[in-house]
Amino acid sequence: MNRIRFLAVLAALALPALPAAAQTDNQTTASGAPKVIGQPQPPRVVPSMIVLNAKGAKLGGGKLVLEGVSPNAIIFADRPVRSAGHALTAHLLEEWSGNDSFAKTPPNATVSVLMKAKAAVVDAVVVLKSPKLEGDKLTFDVDVLEGDLVGGDGAASVFMDIINLPMARRTAHRGAWYHGSN
């Protein structure tokens, strides 16, 4: 029993040093310069889509109300960039403030809500204006372009199209991003 205890203590003392050694050995080249993987590229603006998720959504009286909205939004770009990331919903809503913002040119969005009983989806296309976040309830003033959410009683997703709109500067700089290959 003492031998097992001795080996356990020895392993506990030796193992924490191994990951640190493994990480530091490969961080520089033979000449001592920092190791670089791939080719560094300057940042660039990539047209992206934004997805807000919520427990439910109601549409009526020129308002879209998202109940139980997620505290973060998903942002992604398709080919050729293939990047994706998250941004806090509160930071995303700041895109409606300022001169060159969504307040001036509001984004279009498709709102999709599940219908639990029929295992179906209802959709509406709207223009999103003047967001107001209170706890986990997010309300937009909207212009309905087509569709409605009648019968939608399940989870909801809002797919925002920001093509040809002002660059999402604040959100892009605060979000956590993954950038795939071109």
Image (cartoon, rainbow, N blue to C red):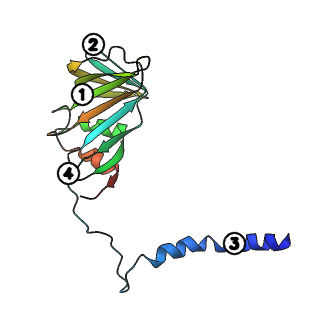
Callout 3 environment at 10 Å: few (<14), some (14 to 19), or many (20+)? Answer: few
Q: Which residue is mark 2?
A: 61
Looking at the rendered structure, the secondary structure element under dot 4 is loop
Q: Residue at x 19, y 38 (%)?
A: 101
Residue 45: numbered disc:
4
Q: Nearer the viewer, residue 84 or 120?
A: 120
Within 10 angstroms of label 1, few (less than 14), some, or many (20 or more) residues?
A: many
Q: Is residue 149 above or below residue 7?
A: above
Considering depth in this image, is 146 or 97 the residue closer to the camera? Answer: 146
Where does label 3 land, which residue? 11
Q: Which residue is found at the position 68% from the left and 73% from the top?
A: 13
Identify the element where label 1 is drawn.
Answer: strand
Q: Quadrant of residue 91?
A: top left
Residue 7: x, y in percent? 75, 73
Q: CA distance from mark 2 to mark 3?
A: 67 Å
Q: Quadrant of the C terminus?
A: bottom left
Earlier residue among tags 1 and 4? 4
Measuring from the top left, give residue 155's x and y in whole percent.
41, 26
Label 1: which residue? 128
Q: Does label 2 or label 1 sit earlier along the sequence?
A: 2
Q: Earlier in the sequence, mark 2 or mark 3?
A: 3
Q: Name the amino acid type tagged 4.
A: Val
Nearer the observer: mark 3 or 4; the answer is: 3
Eye-nearest disc, 1 or 3: 3
Circle 3 — which element?
Answer: helix
